[in-house]
Image (cartoon, rainbow, N blue to C red):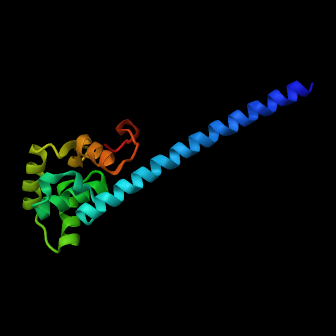
Amino acid sequence: MPDDDLAREVQELKKALAELRESFNLVSQLAQAYLKLLNIYAQYGELSIDVAVPEVRGDPIAREIVRILFDLKRANVSQIARELKGRRGKASRNTVRAKLTELKELGIIIEVPGERGKTYSLSREVVRKWLEMIGMPIRLDQLNDY
């Protein structure tokens, strides 16, 4: 009998130790991701999706459109122009269309056919680069919006 009790206690201790190791690994991953975020912030002065898209750094309108699409997930030209006007004070649909064409040619955004016309979204590659850059262990197949 005492051997059975001892064996049960050893098994419970093994299980508790395994759970502690798993928790420690998770905390370690979170700490590494946090340090990575601090490094990105120190390097760029901000944490924004456009950090993962160096092609738009010199173009303030394109950079803001990338940020808008990151925030909204999907939007049409009118929605992007309205949001851009709210953020920058002015925006025209023609300018937005031209920038969207440039961003599409660069592979930064994709055109998504919708019920009421075209909408635009960030490409999966841009989202993947962003998630990788900030150290988030999220797989793209877990995200419905991209």
Q: Is residue 92 above or below residue 37?
A: below
Res. 55 visible in picture = yes
> Among all residues in the image, which is located at the extreme bottom?
89
Depth check: give the residue in front, 134 or 81. Answer: 134
Q: Looking at the figure, which quarter contains the N terminus? A: top right
Residue at 9%, 44% (x, y): give it: 105
Depth check: give the residue in front, 29 or 119. Answer: 29
Q: Is residue 84 above or below residue 135?
A: below
Residue 68 figure quarter:
bottom left
Q: Is residue 11 above or below residue 76?
A: above
Depth check: give the residue in front, 142 or 120. Answer: 142
Q: How many marks?
A: 0
Is residue 139 rendered to the left or right of residue 116? right
Residue 61 figure quarter:
bottom left
Instruction: Return the x and y of residue 123 as percentages of the image width and height.
Output: 23, 43
Is residue 122 rendered to the left or right of residue 21? left
Residue at 8%, 61% (x, y): give it: 95
Q: Is residue 95 above or below residue 135?
A: below
Res. 47 visible in picture = no
Instruction: Return the x and y of residue 92 as percentages of the image width and height.
Output: 10, 65
